[in-house]
Amino acid sequence: YVILSGSVEVFQELKLPIRVSDKGAFVREMSAGHLFGAVSMLWVRRRTESVYVSEKGKAVFGRLSRKIFQNVVVRNEMMERERREDCLRTSSMLETLSDEQISQIADVLQKKCYKAGEVVVRQGEPGNEFY
């Protein structure tokens, strides 16, 4: 779930003889922009916490099913892989490689982001990888 507006309170039932409240022990409050339920959805596990709409007022949620989430992720990964392959095909150094070899390289590329002015490679360092 994505909290689109409002806020929720998260509680967890304790395995103690003393109850903190009818809802269990308060864990945290979450507001618009936060997600919950992803771990249970992704790994098909039982919920480990209960989520209640805050006493402050109503809340609106966006719900995403496991099947749709997986389809979106797979589709995104396929598009990202195609972008990497297209980029690799423009390199004259790799022009003799087959489509299968380009695909294999695209599959193992590791994405790394740099901040403005950050060193990518430094003169004198061993060349253990290429960019």
Image (cartoon, rainbow, N blue to C red):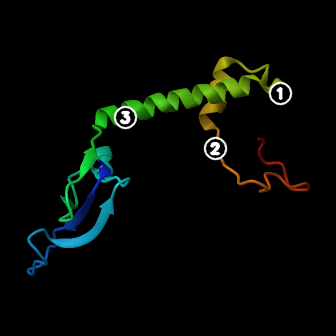
Residue under label 1, please give it. 93
Residue under label 2, please give it. 111
- Residue type highlighted by circle 2: Lys
In the image: residue 31, left or right of residue 49: right
Q: At numbered mark 2, what does the secondary structure look like: helix, strand or loop?
A: loop
Please rate how many residues cluster around mark 3, counting C-alpha atoms within 10 Å: few if below 14, some from 14 to 19, many from 20: few
In the image: residue 84, left or right of residue 68: right
Residue 14, picture quadrant: bottom left
Spatial separation of the CA atoms under disc 1 and disc 3: 35 Å
- Residue type highlighted by circle 3: Gln
- What residue appears at the point 38 percent right and 30 percent down from the top-left corner? 71
For marks 3 and 2 on the same chain, the one whose residue lies earlier in the sequence: 3
Residue 127 percent across, percent down from the top left = 83, 48
Q: Which label lies toward us, 1 or 3?
A: 3
Residue 65 percent across, percent down from the top left = 27, 37
Q: Is residue 35 above or below residue 94?
A: below
In the image: residue 98, left or right of residue 44: right
- Residue type highlighted by circle 1: Met
Residue under label 3, please give it. 70
For marks 1 and 2 on the same chain, the one whose residue lies earlier in the sequence: 1
